[in-house]
Image: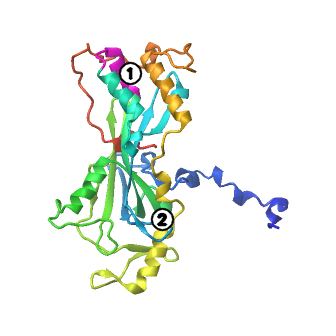
Amino acid sequence: MANLDDLFSGNLDNKMDFLNDKKQVNADGIYRIDLTKVKDKKRGYRSIIRFLPNLTKDGTVGQAAIEKITHYVDIKNAKELSGWFDSAKNFNEKCPLTDLYYQMQNSKNAILIEKSKMLKYSKKYYSYVLIIEDEQQPELVGKVMIFQYGKTIKDKILAEKNGEISGVECNVFDLSAGKDFVMLVKEIQTGDETYPDYKNSMFKPETSSLPIYFEDKQSFKNVPLVDGKVDPKAQTMVRESLMKRDHELEDFSPKRLTEEQQAKINEISAYLTGKSSSGFNSSKQPSSSDFELDGVVESGSKSDSSADVDSDDFFSDF
């Protein structure tokens, strides 16, 4: 029988982690840049991370990053229709939300074109990272977490792989000759929205072996190399270090739309286009307050689009 001493002794304080804000912020294993903790806005958010290879639970090496296309439907007057959806394009299939967006965009109807802005799109990448430094969240130092990033950082990884920065090709995920990534993140304003800007973040110019965190000393030490490779004597420690995590990368893989989600998308289409849908509550037709008409142009003309903000930015709170 399980030990029930805590149940009857009144010693339940250690079972109240849900009240601990610090515990809950990263409870899903995602490493988030929390701009609310930045003290100097000019200086911005600062941390150093190391991208890690994907050593899976079965001991194989998987893809270094998971790519996922996501839609967010944002209908202010019909919150029950708003929400996140993994795109069918993740499986090279037709996506009903993508099709709906382009149908509305190409409708030559100014109102439908404006309402199409309620259908957001994001392509994200997920990788394991080691937190080396974080001024704002020091409790995360030494942890292996999952970092969600967009095109801005993906392009920086690609530039290193192609040798575009230093003239020397570098796989930043490499255990023996990777690179630490310096995060320099500031807020930018686009309309009424505030986003994190990652463009000034960069990889360090020098390569290094994987740093291992020694919790008892609260310090890092780089893995020793033999002939340019990780010392065989240190390989067990490296494997243990990579597996010292609370969540698996594969948990963030794209999911196929469920029947319930498909039905909800049908209702979203009916709501935005005004077309009937079985099971759709027709008494809740879209009103003018559902969308902004400022800047709506006549059909056939082009509007001035806002600055091209990386999807890193729009979906930073996902």
Asked whether, in this view, residue 303 is left or right of residue 89, the answer is left
| Residue 208, horizontal then vertical, whole percent | 30, 73
Asked whether, in this view, residue 178 is left or right of residue 70, the answer is left
Q: What stretch is highlighted in magenta?
A: 107-118
Question: Relative to residue 62, is residue 279 depicted above or below?
Answer: above
Mark 2 packing: few (<14 Cα in 10 Å), some, or many (20+)?
Answer: many
Look at the numbered disc 1 and give the secondary structure of its residue. Answer: helix
Asked whether, in this view, residue 99 is left or right of residue 278, the answer is left
The residue singled out by tag 1 in the image is 115
Task: Specify whether residue 20 is in view.
Answer: yes
Residue 113 painted magenta? yes
Q: Which amino acid does label 1 sit on?
A: Lys
Residue 118: name its quadrant.
Answer: top left
Say whether disc 2 or disc 1 marks the residue closer to the N-terminus. Answer: 1
Q: Which of 40 and 214 is in front in this view?
A: 214
The residue singled out by tag 2 in the image is 143
| Residue 53, horizontal then vertical, whole percent | 38, 66
Return the residue found at the far front.
93
Task: Specify whether residue 218 is in view.
Answer: no
Q: Main secondary structure of the magenta part?
A: helix
Q: Which of 299 and 26 is in front in this view?
A: 299
Question: Tell me, what colour scheme is on the image?
Answer: rainbow
Q: Residue at x 27, y 81 (%)?
A: 228
| Residue 137, horizontal then vertical, whole percent | 47, 57
| Residue 292, horizontal then vertical, whole percent | 38, 19
Image quarter where the N terminus lies is: bottom right
Look at the numbered disc 2 and give the secondary structure of its residue. Answer: loop
Q: Nearer the viewer, mark 2 or mark 1?
A: 1
Residue 152 painted magenta? no
Asked whether, in this view, residue 83 is left or right of residue 68, the answer is right
